[in-house]
Protein backbone atom coordinates (compact mmCIF):
# COMPACT_ATOMS: atom_id res chain seq x y z
CA UNK A 1 0.00 0.00 0.00
CA UNK A 2 1.39 3.39 -0.96
CA UNK A 3 2.11 5.65 2.00
CA UNK A 4 0.19 8.89 2.45
CA UNK A 5 3.50 10.69 2.83
CA UNK A 6 4.54 9.55 -0.65
CA UNK A 7 1.14 10.38 -2.15
CA UNK A 8 0.92 13.87 -0.64
CA UNK A 9 4.57 14.90 -1.00
CA UNK A 10 5.26 13.38 -4.44
CA UNK A 11 1.82 13.42 -6.02
CA UNK A 12 2.97 13.99 -9.60
CA UNK A 13 5.58 11.20 -9.37
CA UNK A 14 2.98 8.78 -8.01
CA UNK A 15 0.52 9.59 -10.80
CA UNK A 16 3.24 9.16 -13.44
CA UNK A 17 4.22 5.84 -11.89
CA UNK A 18 0.65 4.57 -11.94
CA UNK A 19 0.28 5.64 -15.56
CA UNK A 20 3.51 3.78 -16.37
CA UNK A 21 1.86 0.72 -14.87
CA UNK A 22 -1.19 1.37 -17.08
CA UNK A 23 -3.46 1.81 -14.06
CA UNK A 24 -6.72 3.29 -15.26
CA UNK A 25 -7.86 6.48 -13.54
CA UNK A 26 -4.53 7.16 -11.81
CA UNK A 27 -5.10 10.86 -11.15
CA UNK A 28 -8.68 10.32 -10.01
CA UNK A 29 -7.59 7.57 -7.60
CA UNK A 30 -4.86 9.73 -6.07
CA UNK A 31 -7.13 12.78 -5.88
CA UNK A 32 -9.69 10.67 -4.06
CA UNK A 33 -7.09 9.41 -1.57
CA UNK A 34 -5.98 12.99 -0.85
CA UNK A 35 -9.61 14.12 -0.44
CA UNK A 36 -10.43 11.30 2.00
CA UNK A 37 -7.29 12.08 4.00
CA UNK A 38 -8.21 15.77 4.07
CA UNK A 39 -11.66 14.90 5.47
CA UNK A 40 -10.02 12.64 8.06
CA UNK A 41 -7.61 15.36 9.14
CA UNK A 42 -10.38 17.96 9.34
CA UNK A 43 -12.40 15.63 11.58
CA UNK A 44 -9.28 15.04 13.70
CA UNK A 45 -8.71 18.83 14.07
CA UNK A 46 -12.31 19.42 15.14
CA UNK A 47 -12.18 16.46 17.54
CA UNK A 48 -8.99 17.80 19.13
CA UNK A 49 -10.60 21.23 19.52
CA UNK A 50 -13.68 19.69 21.16
CA UNK A 51 -11.58 17.69 23.59
CA UNK A 52 -9.55 20.78 24.48
CA UNK A 53 -12.77 22.72 25.16
CA UNK A 54 -14.08 19.87 27.32
CA UNK A 55 -10.88 19.93 29.36
CA UNK A 56 -11.16 23.70 29.82
CA UNK A 57 -14.81 23.46 30.93
CA UNK A 58 -13.98 20.61 33.32
CA UNK A 59 -11.50 22.86 35.14
CA UNK A 60 -14.07 25.68 35.26
CA UNK A 61 -16.84 23.48 36.62
CA UNK A 62 -14.78 22.45 39.63
CA UNK A 63 -13.89 26.06 40.41
CA UNK A 64 -17.50 27.25 39.98
CA UNK A 65 -18.81 24.53 42.30
CA UNK A 66 -16.31 25.57 44.98
CA UNK A 67 -17.46 29.17 44.63
CA UNK A 68 -21.09 28.12 45.01
CA UNK A 69 -21.95 29.23 41.49
CA UNK A 70 -24.14 26.23 40.83
CA UNK A 71 -26.17 27.78 38.01
CA UNK A 72 -23.04 28.70 36.05
CA UNK A 73 -21.59 25.27 36.76
CA UNK A 74 -24.73 23.61 35.36
CA UNK A 75 -24.52 25.76 32.25
CA UNK A 76 -20.91 24.67 31.81
CA UNK A 77 -21.95 21.03 32.21
CA UNK A 78 -24.54 21.52 29.46
CA UNK A 79 -21.82 22.86 27.15
CA UNK A 80 -19.66 19.84 27.98
CA UNK A 81 -22.54 17.53 27.04
CA UNK A 82 -22.86 19.28 23.66
CA UNK A 83 -19.12 19.03 23.13
CA UNK A 84 -19.15 15.31 23.97
CA UNK A 85 -21.89 14.73 21.42
CA UNK A 86 -19.96 16.67 18.81
CA UNK A 87 -16.78 14.75 19.72
CA UNK A 88 -18.53 11.46 19.10
CA UNK A 89 -19.65 12.69 15.68
CA UNK A 90 -16.13 13.81 14.74
CA UNK A 91 -14.67 10.56 16.05
CA UNK A 92 -17.12 8.58 13.90
CA UNK A 93 -16.30 10.71 10.84
CA UNK A 94 -12.59 10.22 11.46
CA UNK A 95 -12.94 6.46 11.92
CA UNK A 96 -15.11 6.14 8.81
CA UNK A 97 -12.59 8.15 6.79
CA UNK A 98 -9.71 5.95 8.00
CA UNK A 99 -11.58 2.79 6.98
CA UNK A 100 -12.51 4.28 3.60
CA UNK A 101 -8.95 5.49 3.01
CA UNK A 102 -7.38 2.11 3.80
CA UNK A 103 -9.87 0.32 1.56
CA UNK A 104 -9.20 2.79 -1.24
CA UNK A 105 -5.41 2.61 -0.93
CA UNK A 106 -5.63 -1.20 -1.19
CA UNK A 107 -7.05 -0.79 -4.71
CA UNK A 108 -4.07 1.30 -5.89
CA UNK A 109 -1.01 -0.65 -7.10
CA UNK A 110 2.62 0.03 -6.28
CA UNK A 111 4.50 2.46 -8.49
CA UNK A 112 7.49 1.21 -10.54
CA UNK A 113 11.09 2.31 -10.13
CA UNK A 114 12.54 4.67 -12.73
CA UNK A 115 14.58 1.89 -14.38
CA UNK A 116 11.42 -0.08 -15.16
CA UNK A 117 10.90 0.21 -18.93
CA UNK A 118 7.84 1.69 -20.55
CA UNK A 119 5.47 -0.82 -22.11
CA UNK A 120 2.02 -2.33 -21.93
CA UNK A 121 2.52 -6.08 -22.34
CA UNK A 122 4.99 -8.98 -22.25
CA UNK A 123 6.30 -8.13 -25.73
CA UNK A 124 7.72 -4.89 -24.30
CA UNK A 125 9.76 -6.59 -21.54
CA UNK A 126 13.50 -5.99 -21.84
CA UNK A 127 15.96 -8.85 -22.28
CA UNK A 128 18.80 -7.77 -19.97
CA UNK A 129 20.87 -10.96 -19.89
CA UNK A 130 21.03 -14.29 -21.66
CA UNK A 131 23.12 -17.43 -21.58
CA UNK A 132 22.96 -17.45 -25.39
CA UNK A 133 24.47 -14.14 -26.48
CA UNK A 134 25.32 -10.60 -25.40
CA UNK A 135 22.27 -8.42 -24.90
CA UNK A 136 22.09 -5.00 -26.52
CA UNK A 137 20.31 -1.90 -25.16
CA UNK A 138 16.76 -1.93 -26.43
CA UNK A 139 16.47 -5.72 -26.74
CA UNK A 140 12.87 -6.63 -26.01
CA UNK A 141 10.92 -9.86 -26.08
CA UNK A 142 9.20 -8.57 -29.20
CA UNK A 143 12.43 -8.36 -31.22
CA UNK A 144 14.36 -11.24 -29.65
CA UNK A 145 15.35 -13.75 -32.32
CA UNK A 146 17.90 -16.00 -30.62
CA UNK A 147 16.85 -19.54 -29.73
CA UNK A 148 19.04 -22.49 -28.80
CA UNK A 149 19.13 -25.80 -30.59
CA UNK A 150 20.96 -28.98 -29.68
CA UNK A 151 19.76 -31.18 -32.52
CA UNK A 152 17.75 -33.47 -30.26
CA UNK A 153 14.41 -34.91 -31.27
CA UNK A 154 11.73 -32.37 -30.46
CA UNK A 155 9.44 -34.39 -28.23
CA UNK A 156 7.38 -32.35 -25.71
CA UNK A 157 7.53 -33.24 -22.03
CA UNK A 158 3.97 -34.55 -21.85
CA UNK A 159 4.86 -37.24 -24.40
CA UNK A 160 8.16 -38.00 -22.65
CA UNK A 161 6.32 -38.25 -19.32
CA UNK A 162 4.04 -40.89 -20.82
CA UNK A 163 6.83 -42.73 -22.65
CA UNK A 164 8.98 -43.09 -19.50
CA UNK A 165 6.03 -43.35 -17.05
CA UNK A 166 7.05 -40.22 -15.12
CA UNK A 167 3.85 -38.19 -14.84
CA UNK A 168 0.23 -39.27 -15.26
CA UNK A 169 -1.95 -36.32 -16.22
CA UNK A 170 -5.08 -38.43 -16.81
CA UNK A 171 -4.84 -39.97 -13.35
CA UNK A 172 -4.67 -36.46 -11.87
CA UNK A 173 -7.89 -35.60 -13.71
CA UNK A 174 -9.53 -38.72 -12.26
CA UNK A 175 -8.46 -37.95 -8.70
CA UNK A 176 -8.97 -34.18 -8.71
CA UNK A 177 -9.25 -32.49 -12.09
CA UNK A 178 -7.15 -30.93 -14.83
CA UNK A 179 -4.01 -29.20 -13.60
CA UNK A 180 -3.28 -31.68 -10.77
CA UNK A 181 -0.72 -34.18 -12.17
CA UNK A 182 0.44 -37.37 -10.46
CA UNK A 183 4.23 -37.90 -10.42
CA UNK A 184 5.36 -41.52 -10.59
CA UNK A 185 8.64 -43.39 -10.05
CA UNK A 186 11.61 -41.47 -11.40
CA UNK A 187 9.30 -38.54 -12.12
CA UNK A 188 8.55 -38.28 -8.41
CA UNK A 189 12.23 -38.81 -7.58
CA UNK A 190 13.23 -36.01 -9.98
CA UNK A 191 10.69 -33.71 -8.35
CA UNK A 192 11.99 -34.49 -4.86
CA UNK A 193 15.61 -34.15 -6.02
CA UNK A 194 14.93 -30.65 -7.35
CA UNK A 195 13.27 -29.63 -4.08
CA UNK A 196 16.24 -30.86 -2.05
CA UNK A 197 18.73 -29.28 -4.47
CA UNK A 198 17.05 -25.87 -4.35
CA UNK A 199 16.77 -25.95 -0.55
CA UNK A 200 20.40 -27.02 -0.17
CA UNK A 201 21.55 -24.19 -2.46
CA UNK A 202 19.43 -21.67 -0.51
CA UNK A 203 20.95 -22.92 2.74
CA UNK A 204 24.45 -22.42 1.32
CA UNK A 205 23.47 -18.86 0.41
CA UNK A 206 22.49 -18.12 4.01
CA UNK A 207 18.71 -18.51 3.85
CA UNK A 208 16.94 -19.92 6.91
CA UNK A 209 14.45 -22.61 5.93
CA UNK A 210 10.84 -22.14 7.03
CA UNK A 211 8.07 -24.73 6.83
CA UNK A 212 4.90 -22.59 6.89
CA UNK A 213 1.20 -23.45 6.64
CA UNK A 214 -0.22 -23.71 3.12
CA UNK A 215 -3.50 -22.08 4.13
CA UNK A 216 -3.68 -18.49 5.38
CA UNK A 217 -6.28 -16.12 6.76
CA UNK A 218 -7.57 -13.06 4.92
CA UNK A 219 -5.31 -10.71 6.90
CA UNK A 220 -2.26 -12.52 5.49
CA UNK A 221 -3.64 -12.24 1.95
CA UNK A 222 -4.19 -8.52 2.41
CA UNK A 223 -0.75 -8.09 3.97
CA UNK A 224 1.15 -9.19 0.88
CA UNK A 225 -1.34 -7.82 -1.64
CA UNK A 226 -3.00 -10.97 -2.97
CA UNK A 227 -6.25 -9.61 -1.58
CA UNK A 228 -8.26 -7.93 -2.89
CA UNK A 229 -6.30 -7.87 -6.19
CA UNK A 230 -6.14 -11.63 -6.89
CA UNK A 231 -9.08 -12.90 -4.88
CA UNK A 232 -10.56 -14.70 -7.89
CA UNK A 233 -7.30 -16.57 -8.51
CA UNK A 234 -7.05 -18.03 -5.00
CA UNK A 235 -8.79 -21.14 -3.71
CA UNK A 236 -11.07 -20.05 -0.86
CA UNK A 237 -12.18 -22.33 1.97
CA UNK A 238 -15.40 -20.43 2.61
CA UNK A 239 -16.56 -22.18 5.80
CA UNK A 240 -13.36 -21.26 7.62
CA UNK A 241 -12.60 -18.14 5.55
CA UNK A 242 -9.11 -19.40 4.75
CA UNK A 243 -7.16 -19.31 1.49
CA UNK A 244 -4.82 -21.87 -0.09
CA UNK A 245 -1.54 -20.09 -0.72
CA UNK A 246 -0.52 -19.18 -4.31
CA UNK A 247 3.10 -18.92 -3.13
CA UNK A 248 5.14 -19.28 0.08
CA UNK A 249 5.68 -15.52 -0.15
CA UNK A 250 2.36 -15.07 1.64
CA UNK A 251 2.89 -17.02 4.89
CA UNK A 252 6.65 -16.33 5.13
CA UNK A 253 6.38 -12.55 4.65
CA UNK A 254 3.44 -12.44 7.09
CA UNK A 255 5.71 -13.78 9.83
CA UNK A 256 6.80 -10.14 10.09
CA UNK A 257 3.33 -8.58 10.10
CA UNK A 258 2.92 -6.09 13.01
CA UNK A 259 6.57 -6.58 13.98
CA UNK A 260 9.28 -3.99 14.71
CA UNK A 261 12.71 -5.43 13.88
CA UNK A 262 16.17 -4.22 14.86
CA UNK A 263 18.27 -2.82 12.04
CA UNK A 264 21.22 -4.99 13.11
CA UNK A 265 19.14 -8.11 12.32
CA UNK A 266 18.54 -7.06 8.69
CA UNK A 267 18.53 -8.35 6.07
CA UNK A 268 16.43 -11.32 7.13
CA UNK A 269 16.77 -14.17 4.61
CA UNK A 270 14.20 -16.98 4.58
CA UNK A 271 13.38 -19.77 2.16
CA UNK A 272 10.50 -22.22 2.06
CA UNK A 273 9.33 -25.20 0.05
CA UNK A 274 5.54 -25.44 -0.26
CA UNK A 275 2.84 -26.66 -2.53
CA UNK A 276 1.21 -23.70 -4.29
CA UNK A 277 -2.38 -23.43 -5.46
CA UNK A 278 -3.71 -21.20 -8.23
CA UNK A 279 -7.07 -21.32 -9.92
CA UNK A 280 -5.60 -19.87 -13.14
CA UNK A 281 -9.09 -18.85 -14.23
CA UNK A 282 -9.30 -18.10 -17.93
CA UNK A 283 -6.18 -20.09 -18.89
CA UNK A 284 -6.60 -22.37 -21.88
CA UNK A 285 -4.95 -23.53 -25.09
CA UNK A 286 -1.58 -25.04 -25.99
CA UNK A 287 0.33 -22.83 -23.53
CA UNK A 288 -1.28 -24.62 -20.56
CA UNK A 289 -0.65 -28.17 -21.77
CA UNK A 290 1.24 -30.63 -19.57
CA UNK A 291 3.25 -28.90 -16.84
CA UNK A 292 3.05 -25.46 -18.42
CA UNK A 293 0.29 -24.19 -16.15
CA UNK A 294 -0.98 -26.11 -13.12
CA UNK A 295 -3.45 -25.55 -10.32
CA UNK A 296 -1.15 -27.22 -7.80
CA UNK A 297 2.65 -27.24 -8.00
CA UNK A 298 5.81 -27.26 -5.90
CA UNK A 299 7.98 -24.19 -5.46
CA UNK A 300 10.87 -22.98 -3.37
CA UNK A 301 10.55 -19.31 -2.46
CA UNK A 302 13.23 -16.97 -1.15
CA UNK A 303 12.12 -13.96 0.92
CA UNK A 304 14.08 -11.02 2.27
CA UNK A 305 13.22 -8.25 4.71
CA UNK A 306 15.69 -5.38 4.42
CA UNK A 307 16.40 -1.69 4.91
CA UNK A 308 15.64 0.78 2.10
CA UNK A 309 19.36 1.55 1.76
CA UNK A 310 20.35 -2.09 1.19
CA UNK A 311 17.34 -3.57 -0.63
CA UNK A 312 18.68 -3.01 -4.17
CA UNK A 313 21.83 -4.91 -3.22
CA UNK A 314 19.65 -7.67 -1.78
CA UNK A 315 17.64 -7.78 -5.00
CA UNK A 316 20.80 -8.24 -7.06
CA UNK A 317 22.00 -11.02 -4.75
CA UNK A 318 18.68 -12.80 -5.24
CA UNK A 319 18.95 -12.46 -9.02
CA UNK A 320 22.50 -13.87 -8.90
CA UNK A 321 21.26 -16.80 -6.79
CA UNK A 322 18.51 -17.75 -9.25
CA UNK A 323 20.85 -17.38 -12.22
CA UNK A 324 23.34 -19.66 -10.46
CA UNK A 325 20.68 -22.36 -10.13
CA UNK A 326 19.91 -22.29 -13.85
CA UNK A 327 23.60 -22.47 -14.70
CA UNK A 328 24.03 -25.53 -12.48
CA UNK A 329 21.02 -27.15 -14.16
CA UNK A 330 22.67 -26.47 -17.54
CA UNK A 331 19.53 -24.87 -18.96
CA UNK A 332 19.55 -22.08 -21.57
CA UNK A 333 18.01 -19.02 -19.97
CA UNK A 334 17.31 -15.34 -20.36
CA UNK A 335 16.50 -12.62 -17.81
CA UNK A 336 13.79 -10.05 -18.46
CA UNK A 337 13.18 -6.74 -16.75
CA UNK A 338 9.41 -6.42 -16.84
CA UNK A 339 7.87 -3.29 -18.30
CA UNK A 340 5.42 -1.21 -16.31
CA UNK A 341 2.33 -2.72 -17.91
CA UNK A 342 3.44 -6.32 -17.26
CA UNK A 343 4.44 -5.90 -13.62
CA UNK A 344 2.42 -7.33 -10.75
CA UNK A 345 0.11 -5.20 -8.64
CA UNK A 346 2.56 -5.03 -5.72
CA UNK A 347 6.05 -4.91 -7.25
CA UNK A 348 8.23 -1.84 -7.72
CA UNK A 349 10.59 -3.75 -10.01
CA UNK A 350 10.53 -7.36 -11.20
CA UNK A 351 12.82 -9.62 -13.21
CA UNK A 352 11.58 -12.83 -14.82
CA UNK A 353 13.79 -15.81 -15.61
CA UNK A 354 12.84 -17.94 -18.59
CA UNK A 355 14.24 -21.23 -19.88
CA UNK A 356 13.89 -22.38 -23.46
CA UNK A 357 11.88 -25.40 -24.50
CA UNK A 358 13.12 -26.56 -27.91
CA UNK A 359 10.32 -29.12 -28.10
CA UNK A 360 7.65 -26.44 -27.65
CA UNK A 361 9.60 -23.75 -29.48
CA UNK A 362 9.07 -21.16 -26.76
CA UNK A 363 10.44 -19.66 -23.57
CA UNK A 364 8.99 -20.79 -20.24
CA UNK A 365 8.91 -18.51 -17.20
CA UNK A 366 10.42 -20.28 -14.17
CA UNK A 367 11.02 -17.43 -11.71
CA UNK A 368 10.00 -13.89 -10.83
CA UNK A 369 12.21 -11.93 -8.45
CA UNK A 370 10.69 -8.71 -7.12
CA UNK A 371 11.45 -5.77 -4.88
CA UNK A 372 8.27 -4.33 -3.37
CA UNK A 373 9.90 -1.30 -1.73
CA UNK A 374 7.69 -0.32 1.26
CA UNK A 375 4.41 -1.32 -0.44
CA UNK A 376 3.91 -4.67 1.32
CA UNK A 377 5.57 -3.45 4.53
CA UNK A 378 3.06 -0.61 4.84
CA UNK A 379 0.17 -3.07 4.58
CA UNK A 380 1.90 -5.47 6.98
CA UNK A 381 3.13 -2.78 9.39
CA UNK A 382 6.53 -4.46 9.05
CA UNK A 383 9.02 -1.96 10.47
CA UNK A 384 12.50 -1.70 11.89
CA UNK A 385 14.20 0.52 14.45
CA UNK A 386 17.43 2.12 13.24
CA UNK A 387 20.51 3.16 15.23
CA UNK A 388 18.83 6.51 16.05
CA UNK A 389 15.81 4.63 17.52
CA UNK A 390 13.65 5.88 14.66
CA UNK A 391 11.01 3.40 13.43
CA UNK A 392 10.75 3.06 9.65
CA UNK A 393 9.08 0.78 7.12
CA UNK A 394 11.13 -2.15 5.84
CA UNK A 395 11.53 -3.18 2.22
CA UNK A 396 10.30 -6.67 1.29
CA UNK A 397 11.60 -8.83 -1.56
CA UNK A 398 10.89 -12.32 -2.83
CA UNK A 399 11.50 -14.66 -5.71
CA UNK A 400 11.05 -18.19 -6.98
CA UNK A 401 14.19 -20.27 -6.52
CA UNK A 402 12.70 -22.12 -8.27
CA UNK A 403 9.20 -23.15 -9.40
CA UNK A 404 9.37 -26.81 -10.38
CA UNK A 405 6.85 -27.61 -13.17
CA UNK A 406 8.51 -25.79 -16.07
CA UNK A 407 11.99 -26.65 -14.76
CA UNK A 408 10.98 -30.31 -14.94
CA UNK A 409 9.54 -29.73 -18.42
CA UNK A 410 12.75 -28.07 -19.62
CA UNK A 411 15.00 -30.76 -18.11
CA UNK A 412 12.99 -33.50 -19.83
CA UNK A 413 12.78 -31.73 -23.17
CA UNK A 414 16.30 -30.28 -23.38
CA UNK A 415 18.13 -33.39 -22.17
CA UNK A 416 16.50 -36.11 -24.26
CA UNK A 417 18.97 -38.40 -26.05
CA UNK A 418 18.61 -41.69 -27.97
CA UNK A 419 19.58 -43.51 -24.75
CA UNK A 420 17.12 -41.64 -22.53
CA UNK A 421 16.84 -38.39 -20.61
CA UNK A 422 20.12 -37.16 -19.16
CA UNK A 423 20.09 -35.77 -15.61
CA UNK A 424 22.14 -32.57 -15.08
CA UNK A 425 25.33 -33.33 -13.14
CA UNK A 426 24.40 -31.05 -10.23
CA UNK A 427 21.22 -33.09 -9.68
CA UNK A 428 22.73 -36.58 -9.78
CA UNK A 429 23.69 -36.61 -6.06
CA UNK A 430 20.02 -35.88 -5.31
CA UNK A 431 18.38 -38.25 -7.80
CA UNK A 432 20.75 -41.16 -7.36
CA UNK A 433 20.64 -41.85 -11.13
CA UNK A 434 22.22 -40.21 -14.18
CA UNK A 435 19.65 -41.08 -16.83
CA UNK A 436 15.97 -41.85 -17.18
CA UNK A 437 15.64 -44.79 -19.55
Image: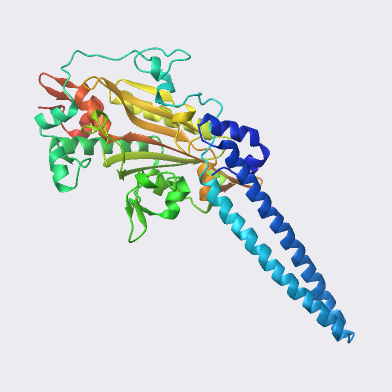
Which picture quadrant has residue 413?
top left
- Name the residue at 45% across, 32% down: 343
Asked if residue 423 shows in the view, the reply is no
Apparent side of residue 318 relative to residue 424 in the rendered image (left or right): right
- Name the residue at 65% across, 47% down: 35
- Name the residue at 10% across, 20% down: 419
Q: Which of the two residues, 195 or 284, is positioned nearer the viewer here?
A: 284
The total number of labels drawn is 0
Residue 321 pos. (x, y %): 39, 30
- Name the residue at 36% across, 38% down: 203
Apparent side of residue 19 relative to residue 180 in the rendered image (left or right): right
Q: Which of the two residues, 179 or 131, is positioned nearer the viewer here?
A: 179
65 w.r.t. 248: above or below:
below
Apparent side of residue 316 relative to residue 130 in the rendered image (left or right): right
Location of the N terminus (image quadrant) = top right
Q: Which of the two residues, 229 or 317, is positioned nearer the viewer here?
A: 229
393 w.r.t. 51: above or below:
above
Asked if residue 156 shows in the view, the reply is yes
Location of the C terminus (image quadrant) = top left
Residue 142 pos. (x, y %): 39, 18
Residue 317 pos. (x, y %): 45, 30
Amino acid sequence: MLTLKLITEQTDRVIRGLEKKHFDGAKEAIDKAIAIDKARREAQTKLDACLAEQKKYAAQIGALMKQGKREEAEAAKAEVAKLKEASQEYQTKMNDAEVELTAHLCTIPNIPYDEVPEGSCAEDNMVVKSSLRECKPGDTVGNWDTIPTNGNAKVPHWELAKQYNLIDFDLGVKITGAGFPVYIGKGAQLQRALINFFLAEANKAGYTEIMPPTVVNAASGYGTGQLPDKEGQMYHCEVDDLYLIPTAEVPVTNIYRDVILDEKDLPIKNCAYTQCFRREAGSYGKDVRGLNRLHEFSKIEIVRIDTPEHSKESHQEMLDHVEGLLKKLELPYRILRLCGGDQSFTSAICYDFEVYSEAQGRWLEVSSVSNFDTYQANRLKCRYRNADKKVQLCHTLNGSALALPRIVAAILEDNQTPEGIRIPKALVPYTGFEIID
